[in-house]
Amino acid sequence: MKTTIFTFAQIIMIMSDVNIQDEIYKDHQRIIAEANFAFRRFFIDEIDWNERLNAILGPRGVGKTSIMLQYIKETFGNDEKVLYVSMDDLLVAQNSLLSIAEYHNLRGGTHLFIDEIHKYENWSQELKNINDRYKKIKVTVSGSNMLGINQGKADLSRRMVEWQVPGLSLREYINIEIGLNLPVVSLQDILHNHLDICNEILKSVTPTAYFQSYLQHGYYPFYLEGKKNYLKKLNNVLNTTLEVDMTRLLGVDINKISVLRKLVYILTTQSPFKPNVSKLSQSLDLDRATLYKYLHYLEDASVVNMLWDKGKTYSLLSKPDKLYLHNCNLFYLSQSSVSIGTLRESFFVSIMSYKYELRLPPQGDFLIDDKYIFEVGGKTKGFGQIANLPDSYVAADDLLIGSGNTIPLWLFGFVY
């Protein structure tokens, strides 16, 4: 039998690593004990937590960490077989992910939760190694939605399941504001039963009373920290996304961040925007290919939503036919008041694009799942261009209850 002989220095190093790792467990217990939640996101129940490798991805500020911690607290409590670590923690940074997983395995661990995975240099290779070596450990990571599983050096596409976290829906915002538990409503139910659904919801709340405040500050859960400085925090989130995430995760030249910022400003003042590529390229001093690339980056970062005409093929080198800001809150970073027409369309796109495919039809404003045509407008909005078209509807603002194929715009805020 071969005997391994360690030097004194190696023994001290091993003991030091163990001590550090034990401190990580203590830190986990403290974080879980101190975690208090003002509300519960629907998204917790969307994830298949039985997968061996999950990735919870999304833009900054939508509550990925809270989702992870809330699930741990609800499901495991103080169970020491579960470990949560964050890669922006200095204590954790002294260990490799692989060594943490190895130590957790030795302790009989079954679940490992890794927050801010995009801040770890060798994340993909070590996740692959953990997945291959420690079959009994289920791993869940969180990270930027720009962190595609194909960006890493190791191939995780057959191992990792991605879950994209959206910001708050109007339904969630109302539930938080007045402590309700209004349920999700599917698009099919809205189309066929909107009268009954509206009447049921109106027994508990008047959604239109919360619609404007949601458009201004309801998309990101950190509004609960205070509405007074909400836009300052949102501006910080946007700047960090551009200056840190895009340079680190997408390789954008730091000297081009000012160009991206200018592009975002144009969209806040002109969205919905039909891009004139020649003029936009000239204004930003970018060639067409780079402009298209940057637009796709902004979509990956959940800053914009890009829409194409029906029948067009999506391509990294193709011009979108219309650009919208990703959510209505972003408009208020550059202006105190926004065109109501812009807000209506942007709300519809922001909400519906989370679960459904949106295109631009030859007639009407939006085509959902290549079947349903929508016009979006105020309460007097008529069918106009979509008269006599099958499966056509009006999503009308300033309505509590619709009739026929005219549906209150606010109700679409209940699809998730």
Image (tube, grey):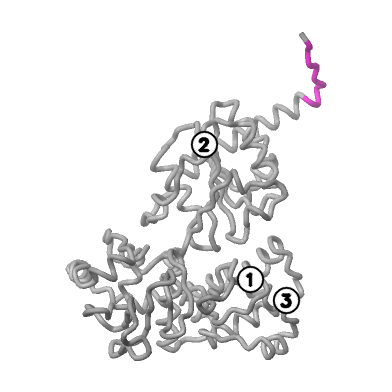
Q: Position of residue 301 (x, y in %)?
A: 59, 67
Q: Measuring from the top left, give residue 343's x and y in whole percent.
A: 43, 82
Q: Is the magenta stretch mostly helix, strand or loop?
A: loop
Name the kind of residue labelled 1 in the image.
Answer: Ser
Using a 10 Å C-alpha cutoff, classify the residue at mark 1 as few (fewer than 14 neighbours), some (14 to 19) or many (20 or more).
Answer: few
Q: What element carries label 1?
A: loop
Residue linked to disc 1: 315
Amino acid marked by disc 2: His
Q: Who is closer to the viewer here, 216 or 146?
A: 146
Q: SS at mark 3?
A: helix
Q: Which amino acid type corresponds to the residue marked 3 in the rendered image?
A: Thr
Q: Is residue 7 magenta?
A: yes
Q: In the visual, does 198 lie left or right of 327?
A: left
Q: Going by the image, does 64 lie left or right of 10?
A: left
- What crowding class fits label 2: few (fewer than 14 Cα within 10 Å), some (14-19), or many (20 or more)? many
Give the residues in magenta. 2-10
Q: Which residue lies furthest to the top in this view?
A: 1
